[in-house]
Each structure stands twice: as C-alpha cells, then as structure tokens.
Image (cartoon, rainbow, N blue to C red):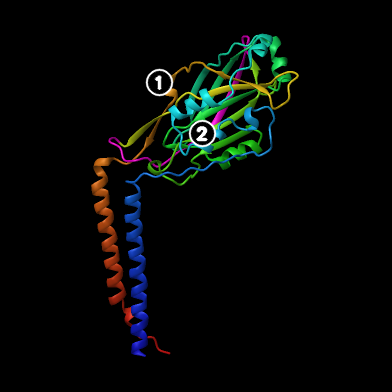
Amino acid sequence: MLSKTVGIKMASIGVQIFVVIGILLTLMHTILVSNEGGKYSTNSDIKTQTISGLPCSEKYITKPYFEKHDRLTDSNFQNFIANELPLGFCGVLQEKLNLVPSLPVLQRYLIGEGSHRRLSSSIRLSVQPESIAELHRHFCKIIIVEKLPSGVFADPFEIQHLIQCGVLTEAAVFGDTNLELPSVVSNRSVVEVHMDVGYNTLSGKNNGLEINIEIPVHARYLPLGERGFSRVEFGSPDIFMHCNMEGKSHDHGCLLMLTGSVTDTETADVWEIPCGIEEHSGVVYAVTFISAVLSAFLIVLTSIYDPDIRKPTLI
C-alpha cells in the first residue's frame, strides 16, 4: 500500500514538473522568435468567379506579381507595373469619354481606435457628366491596389464578409495573410479592390465622380521600440481604370494607371501602434524567468509537503 502511494505521489510530481518545464520552454521559444526574422507568404483570393476584360486573362492584376516574388517591395512592384502590366491602348476611349487621366485621393484617414481600424479613401475621377453613361457601357471599373506597410494586415475573412454583405463587390488579399504572426516574422500584404463605375457606386459632383472606400486593417505585434509606440506610415495606393473596348472581345481591354495627389498626409496616413519599450526588456525577461522558476519550486514543495498528497489512500 505504501509503495503504491509513493508511486502515485512521484507520478503526480513528475507530471507537474513536466508542465513547468513546458511552460519554461514556451517562454524561451517566444523570446527567441521575437529576435529572429522569417518569411511567410500566402495568397488569398476572396472571390473566384471569372471576370472578363482584365489583362492577361487574370482576375486581379496583383496576382502575377506574387507568382514571381515571395515578398512585396516597392521597387519590385513599381518595376512590375512599368514592365509587365499592359498599360495603354486607351487613347481613343479617353478622347471619346473626355476623360482626364488624373485621380487625386481627396482624403485619406484612419477611422476607429486601438489595434483595429478602417483605412478610408475618397477618390475623385475627373470626367464630364455626359461621359458617365459611356463609362458604364464600356464596363469600366476602378482598381485600387493598397500596399499595406509592415506591421499592418488585412483579414481575408473579414474582406470576404464585406463582399457577402455587398459593401465591396470584388476584393482579394495577396502576400502574407497569416493573422497570428508578429511583425518581425511577417511580410507585407496587398489588398486589391475593384469598384464598378456605375450610378450606384459613384456620385456626381462638380464635373467629377467620387468614390469612397473603407478597408479594415489590423495591427500586428511590433518589435520593441524606444518610446512605447511605433510609427507606421501608409503610402499612396496605386489606382487603375480598366474598360472593355467597343467592338473588341472581352479579353482585350484598356488599362490606364491614374495618378494624383493625397491631401492631409501629415495625419491621414500615420498610425502609432503601441509596442514594448526596449529599455525594459531585460527587466521583463528577468522577472518572467524568476517568476517561472519560483512557481515551479512552489509546485514541487506543495507536492512534497501537502498533507492531502502524503496521506495514504485506504482501499
């Protein structure tokens, strides 16, 4: 009987020590991961039905870039736009529609508080009122390519929910869509949104059409900083217009890149995300390690000297 009680007691102590060791190893792994970089890249295509008229028979113009590159860099993406996208062939259509190839982003700001915000953009398309019907007849659409900075990501499931609710018509997230990764081991991602140029999505105003769009964005866990906040800046989106040419097949369209300016850039595109203070890291690591060791020691002492454990079990 005594040997059986001792065996049960030793087994209980062994399990508790194993749990404590597992906790310590988890803490050590977390510390090591926070100091290492990594590369993870996945693509998420939210809506899969085919849309005719896009160049190279691709639904999204961003997709070919991530088929050739593992990560997003501004220089590589600009080279991709300049050398691989079939821009142009819009001269006749521009003259017919009296379209000014300029698309200023009138306002651009973050909505909300905390780690979950909405990136709002208000875009003006300069076009004559009589040309609006022509835009709709040529199945024109505005393509917004939002290159998110490091430390910010878009949830593909949330984007899909917005599509199902009719807030967005078509959208896709490319790049790193792993929602759990901290900033130090994650790559940048891209959100591509398509907006049909129709009466239901655009509002005429002063010989122009205005498009308003909101993209939900979320903050990742950022590396340690000097003052407890990390400054994340959003760049201007790349904006295109795609139309099907009259008398042409749907696989031959016109893709035009629209350039413009951003207003209120000092406050609109900046997000100060909380992060740990680097000077405090040593103290935090030491306190965490000491607390874990003391907890393990107290568990062992309790297992040895607890009278309920020491008392033999009568059968």
Q: Residues within 10 Å of mark 1 (few under 14, many from 20)?
A: few
Q: Give the image location of residue 54, x and y in percent.
A: 65, 28
Q: Which mark is residue 279?
A: none
Res 140 → quadrant: top right
Q: Is residue 145 above or below residue 160?
A: above
The boundaries of the magenta stretch are: 205-227
Q: Is residue 194 visible?
A: yes
Q: Give the image location of residue 310, x and y in percent.
A: 32, 81
Q: Is residue 70 above or below residue 96?
A: below
User: As drawn, which residue projects farthest toward the front?
Assistant: 83
Q: On the rendered structure, is 155 left or right of 23?
A: right
Res 55 → quadrant: top right
Q: Is residue 32 above or below residue 209?
A: below
Foreground of the two, 258 or 248: 248
Q: Does the magenta run of residues contain 206? A: yes
Mark 2 or mark 1, which is nearer the start of the sequence? 2
Task: Name the secondary structure under disc 2.
Answer: strand
Q: Name which residue lies at 29% across and 63% down.
A: 295
Kind of residue indicated by mark 1: Glu
Q: Give the image location of residue 112, x and y in percent.
A: 48, 32
Foreground of the two, 314 or 35: 35
Which quadrant, please, contains the N terminus? Answer: bottom left
Q: Which residue is mark 1?
A: 266
Q: Which residue is mark 2?
A: 190
Q: Is residue 169 visible?
A: no
Foreground of the two, 149 or 75: 75
Query: Alpha carbon of mark 1 to alpha carbon of mark 2: how far?
Result: 23 Å
Kind of residue indicated by mark 2: Val
Q: On the rendered structure, is 186 left or right of 278?
A: right
